[in-house]
Amino acid sequence: MDKIREVAAKVLEWILYNKTIFVPFIPYREKLEEIIPNDGDLKWGVPTFSCPCEVTSDKLLQ
């Protein structure tokens, strides 16, 4: 599960911050950029780091 969480977060980070291919029309983009930092060295597979970000982002969908 940790590996899946890590891959999913890295893909989301890539979609949000890619300078070569800009993905327009992402709902709540500004809020997601506040929650998910643009730092490639983050340990998304570690639950103590990623779970607070997941909880915050889940609140956007409610």
Image (cartoon, rainbow, N blue to C red):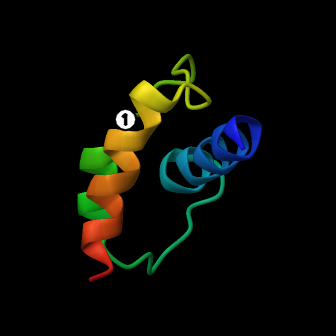
- The percent position of residue 10, horizontal first and vertical second, equals 63, 41
Residue at image position (32%, 41%) is 52
Looking at the image, which residue sits at the far top?
41
Query: Which of the 4 image quadrants contains residue 32?
Result: bottom left
Q: Is residue 22 above or below residue 17?
A: below
Residue at image position (51%, 21%) is 42
- The percent position of residue 11, horizontal first and vertical second, equals 66, 50
Query: Image quadrant for the N terminus?
Result: top right
Residue 62 appearing in the image: yes
Q: Nearer the viewer, residue 61 or 48?
A: 48
- The percent position of residue 26, horizontal first and vertical second, equals 44, 75
Secondary structure of residue under mark 1: loop
Query: Horizontal placement of 35 versus 7: left or right?
Result: left
Q: Is residue 37 above or below residue 34?
A: above
> Which residue was labeled with disc 1?
37
**How many residues crowd mark 1 within 10 Å: few (<14), some (14–19), many (20+)?**
few
Query: Which of the 4 image quadrants contains residue 31?
Result: bottom left
Residue at image position (45%, 36%) is 50
Query: Which of the 4 image quadrants contains residue 62?
Result: bottom left
The amino acid type found where label 1 is placed reads: Pro
Query: Horizontal placement of 21 versus 22: left or right?
Result: right
Residue 19 appearing in the image: no
Residue at image position (68%, 36%) is 2
Q: Nearer the viewer, residue 24 or 26?
A: 26
Q: Nearer the viewer, residue 59 or 22?
A: 59
Query: Horizontal placement of 8 versus 56: left or right?
Result: right
Query: Horizontal placement of 30 versus 13: left or right?
Result: left
- The percent position of residue 30, horizontal first and vertical second, equals 25, 61
